[in-house]
Amino acid sequence: MLALIVLSGSLLCGCGGSGSSSTPTPTPTPTQTPAAAPTITTKAAQNGAMVVSLASTTSGATIYYTLDNTTPTTSSQIYVAPFLVASNLTVQALATASGDSNSTVTTKAFTPNIPSGTLVWSDEFTSAVAQGQPDATVWTYDTGGNGFGNNELEDYCAWGSTAAPCATASPNAYTSTDGYLHIVAQSPSAGVYTSARLKSQGLFSFQYGRIEAKIKIPESQGMWPAFWLLGNNINTVPWPACGELDVMEHIDGTNPPPYAGATPLGYDWVQASVHGTGLNGGTPYHPSGFSPGEWHTYGMIWSKGQVQFYIDDPTMPYETFTPGTGTWPFDAGPQFLLLNLAVGGSWPGNPDATTVFPSEMVVDYVRLYTN
């Protein structure tokens, strides 16, 4: 039986015999190209340690890596900055990119066999000129005057910045022929303050070891010097979940500490502390006879599941932290270094008529040893 169907003015035949109609050709599935496998390059540090960098030639690739002999996946640590290798371990890295399949895994084993207590990295802040640029392969800068979450008053200035109130003729951070790093808080006009916040973010990072800096800090109302670390992953895991390790902060304010139970100690004390999600710890340090304004070595011994802080003597840590309440972020990956001198803020209070400008935080060295 022949059925005639009229549809949109066309005459169609719905017959069961072999007609002239054809089956549509399937669209082929696009073939994915693998992302370029990461390269692992090294730069010598000290006494056999290496600074390791990862890269992929695929534009926009994300690199995931492991250091614990497991195969990296997209759940592994994301590479964001060169990191120090000072122990026997294997780096494995995987690259991914939108529209591409995953790369093959690149593997490189390191066997430096470095003894405990060995110096493996340092910045000694040597300079052939009176006002030299801090090592640009290690240090970059936070800039601006947004208060940095602490109601600070300063504008942070980078090396060479000409944006007012910064001035190249009066750098806020420089190395000198005396072998020191100078971080200088200035007041170029009434109520205007400049300083510097150096950081190794994106340039150098490490996980575990004994880190210390020899520092002389200013004692003046509203000065807030600090030596500290933040997690490399801060751009993807915002503070405080990225983890913060404060090796030294100094308070020399006329106002009492702003938290319950704190001991004023004459309002002239240093403190080491840890911060993470639901994790805050640290107590003021000012034993009898301790003078914060003199040269001291501020250090931290960082190992898996433990952070210890000391002043001058690494065999005598005065504060120890281990996982407990809150989330412990300090085994998640490397951290980068910061050195800064803030002016005013919620902790030290603001400068007053007694505050000295310029005030300097002077750093002799930063050194990292194996545990």
Image (cartoon, rainbow, N blue to C red):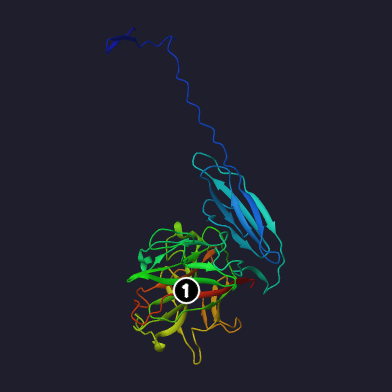
Looking at this view, name the residue that lies furthest to the bottom. Answer: 288
Question: In this rendering, does residue 285 appear at all?
Answer: yes
Which element is circle 1 on?
Answer: strand
Q: Is residue 349 left or right of residue 179?
A: left
For the C terminus, the quadrant is bottom right
Q: Residue at x 55, y 50 (%)?
A: 63
Q: Which residue is nearer to you in this view: 37 or 265?
A: 265
Residue 256 in the image, given as x and y percentages of width and height: 35, 84
Which sits in the foreground, 329 or 364? 364
Relative to 353, say whether 326 is above or below. Answer: above
Q: Is residue 150 visible?
A: no
Q: Pick whichever, 97 or 196, lies toward us.
A: 196
Report the residue marked by disc 1.
226
The mark tally for this picture is 1
Judged left or right of residue 347, residue 242 is: right
Residue 137: percent from left, percent from top: 58, 59
Residue at 33% in and 7% down: 2
Q: Position of residue 266 (x, y in %)?
A: 40, 88
Q: Is residue 268 above or below residue 367?
A: below
Towards the viewer: 149 or 362: 362
Amino acid of disc 1: Ala
Q: Quadrant of residue 108?
A: bottom right
Please identify the quadrant where the N terminus is shown: top left
Vertical relation: 202 (above or below) 47: above
Measured from the top left, where is residue 225 in percent x and y? Answer: 45, 75
